[in-house]
Amino acid sequence: MIRSFLSFKWLYRLSSPKFFYSTSGKAIPWLLLISVTLLAVGLFWGLLIAPPDARQGDSFRIIYIHVPSSFLALAGYYFMAVAGAVGLVWRTKLSFWFMKSAASIGASMTFLALFTGAIWGRPSWGTYWVWDARVTSMLILLFLYLGVMAMIRAFDNKEYGQKNGAILALVGTVNVPIIYKSVDWWHTLHQPATLKLTSESTIHIDMLQPLLVMIVGFYLFYALTICLFLRAEILYHEQATSWVKDLCVRRQEKSG
Amino acid sequence: MARSTFEATIAPIVFMCMGVSLIPLALPPDSASHSSIAPGIVWIMVLLASLMSLERIFTFDYEDGSLEQLLISPQLLTQPIFGKLVAHWVMTGVPMALASPIMAFVLSLPADGYIPMILSIVIGSAYLSLAGSVCASLTVSLGRGGFLLPITVIPLYMPIIIFGTATIDFAISGMDWLFPLAVMGTFLCLATAICPIVVAAIFRSTPLF
């Protein structure tokens, strides 16, 4: 069992579009159930039960959307770049489609982080938008995502476009550490990171627990959307193959 | 040849100076406010001027087929590409660095900032040529005047504009300006090692006509 897991055969099998399509079909109901439950519990806990902040009052509660979406905006860039690298090296079609899906979802997450940040900025900083180091670098991250999305779609030759998008995504990773570190390097308005892996977090435990639930929920939600996007990509690109045609025929028969 | 020299070397400088002359028109007319924003203005102008000249690195070679000749030549592709990038930097970056004191003078930059500014532009524009060449080679088959080149290349320019303005700012306020300059040098070293190889790999997979 362990030996077969370590031989990465499962990974090779998973990179076949057909196998991924059927496996993800089984995983989607579970992902949906768990992520929606976690998000609902986390929101209820964070918005209603957690104590209000001593200085910011109730307005801090937007942290339960803002922090998880920022996490995924940054992590999603790495997922996208790594998928692009895997596609360039092993020439698997699925990883390029993963990259394309991750680009769209990551861009939406970045937009969500910026948008909730702007709403949060109004009561705590007194303005919606500041050219603060963290805010500006997140905006640059959004541009990076948009650049990769535009690059993938710019060429008539789809494979060439995907390859170019992967290269651009890899080159753009130069910026991601700068965005991570921007709050520590420039002491502007944005507060330093609240959650730290290596040292103690600067947030009270009662506020931290729902935040962790929300972060896990967001990650699962991200996995769910990736699966849905990827399945759409697979159907689109493999529409000429026999298994997709069979699938359509069976669907039609089932619906009547 | 004369025409291309003009477009490569003189035009970016003229563009930079004209852009700078717009700043006093748009801002309140006291020179104190200009000197505090001078480092940022100078760097934005360098960035835009270098963006303008970026398309020239490969487009002509792609159009007249000399890129194809490079691809089928027996020698390593990274060498002529590196040569082209060095040439691009000598033709655009170095003249911009030499012309930058004019801009700094117009914007009344304090005297301490001149030498750090020139050094930061010399180093930074080399990085701009190298990082920009990656995007230029990715978009070469789309032809000229596309919007894809600027939107993909501006995020890559982010580190250099941060540390470039920091170099001048540090020098003006009397801090150790060699630190941000050294960071720029690090970025330049990385880009020198990686970019020519990446560009060569991109051209190997580019569909030529």
Image: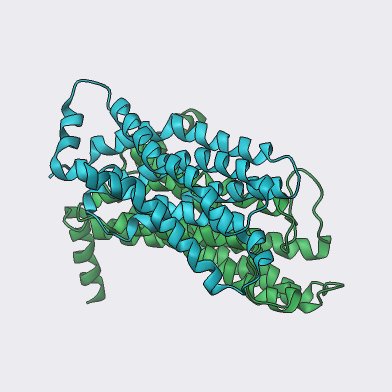
Residue B198: image location, x then y, percent: 36, 35
> Is residue B173 found left or right of B132 in the rendered image?
right
Q: Residue furthest right?
A: A54
Residue at 77% in and 61% down: A208
Q: Residue furthest top?
A: B74
The answer to which image quadrant residue A234 occupies is bottom left
The answer to which image quadrant residue B2 occupies is top left
Q: Chain B is which colour?
A: cyan
- In the rendered view, would you say A44 is above or below B145? below
Residue at 75% in and 74% down: A124
Quadrant location of the C terminus of chain B in the rendered image: top left
Chain letter for the green colouring in the rendering: A
- In the rendered view, would you say B189 is above or below A108? above
Residue A204: image location, x then y, percent: 84, 61
> In terms of depth relative to the viewer, which is nearer, A25 or A104?
A104
> Is residue A256 found left or right of B135 in the rendered image?
left
The answer to which image quadrant residue B24 occupies is bottom right
Whether residue B23 appears in this view of the structure is yes
Residue at 68% in and 77% down: A127
Residue A109: image location, x then y, percent: 53, 64
Quadrant location of the N terminus of chain B in the rendered image: top left
Residue B104: image location, x then y, percent: 57, 53
